[in-house]
Image (cartoon, rainbow, N blue to C red):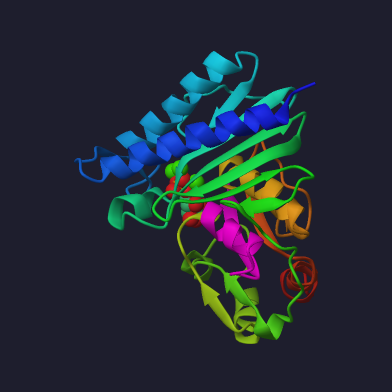
Amino acid sequence: MMNWHEVDTYAKQWITEAGEKIRESFKEVLTIQTKSNADDLVTNMDKETEQFFIRNINHTYPSHKILGEEGFGHKLTDLEGIIWIIDPIDGTMNFVHQQRNFAISVAVFENGIGKLGYIYDVVHDELYHAIKGEGAYVNDARIPDLRDTNLSEAVIGINATWVTENTRINPQILAPLIKDVRGTRSYGSAALEIAYVVTGRLDAYMTMRLSSWDFAAGIVLIEEVGGRLTNLEGKPVNLLEENSVLVAKTKIHDEIISSYILKK
Ligand code: IPD
Ligand code: CA
Ligand code: CA
Ligand code: CA
């Protein structure tokens, strides 16, 4: 049996150390490269941070597997065993352009079940963390269970790419939703936006395409406060593929799917 409290202590130690290194990097010149297109950025700090986690995990838990955005971990074809799912910097564009609104996201899953989840807002030194079944916290403060809100009073996280043509969803369905809610926000870090749903700062966050490192920690956190994370059809997400994601308070989650996304 895994001692999850021991793993939790290591995870927090490594995340804190990685955060310090990232804050120190603000004084230095970053090496910035592009990946799939000119807007898809990666820096030396994304890569170094992922490698830092991998070195520590391999040393302390050599049998654990690692899935990381920058590809220094394993190529996984199944979810068996203990898997660390790591986004070393979520919100790289914000990191490069704003030096704020980015996070380290780390989750530990066992046989497909989320056990530990961490989203670290590096600049605010705020660590959102949860051990499955033991509640969610931000630093030392317990995060209360979510309370349902009416859609008319909801603030939802959504970004402007939804108005562009895409293969997943008809942008037309959005106008009624945006009219009906109180407001919309876009922060540019999926992990932080999920953390904001966990803490009730946002009532929902929806997005067309994420990988598991963007939301794996969020799954563990949202379950601890009674919220829901699925794809946009309300089905479970797949950690080995890209997914659309809707994370929200339960009532709003169901309402967005039935009254807007799947509405005939
Ligand atoms: C991105 C951010 C962004 C989301 C993108 C992600 P990255 O992650 O979370 O908010 O809209 O889909 O890829 O590349 O900065 O780690
Ligand atoms: Ca990226
Ligand atoms: Ca990301
Ligand atoms: Ca990233």
Vertical placement of residue 224 versus 45, above or below: below
- Which percent across, then down, holds residue 81? 73, 22
Residue 112 position by quadrant: top right
Q: How many marks?
A: 0
On the rendered image, what quadrant is the C terminus found in? bottom right
Q: In terms of image quadrants, where is residue 29?
A: top left
Left or right of 187 in this view: 166? right
Whether residue 182 appears in magenta in the rendering, the answer is: no
Seen at 60% across and 13% down, the residue is: 62
Q: Is residue 238 visible?
A: yes
Task: Name the residue rendered at 58%, 23% in the picture.
Answer: 75
**Extreme residue in the front direction:** 140
The one nearer the camera, 136 or 191, is 136
Q: Quadrant of the N terminus?
A: top right
Residue 197 magenta: yes
Q: Is residue 35 above or below residue 147?
A: above
Q: In this picture, is 249 found above or below 34? A: below
The magenta stretch is 191-210
**85 on left or right of 219:** left
Q: Position of residue 128 (x, y in %)?
A: 58, 51
The answer to which of 240 and 93 lies nearer the viewer is 93
Q: Is residue 207 left or right of residue 148?
A: left
Question: Is residue 39 visible in this depiction of the protein?
Answer: no
Q: Residue 39: x and y, percent?
A: 35, 51
Horizontal and vertical percent position of residue 90: 47, 47
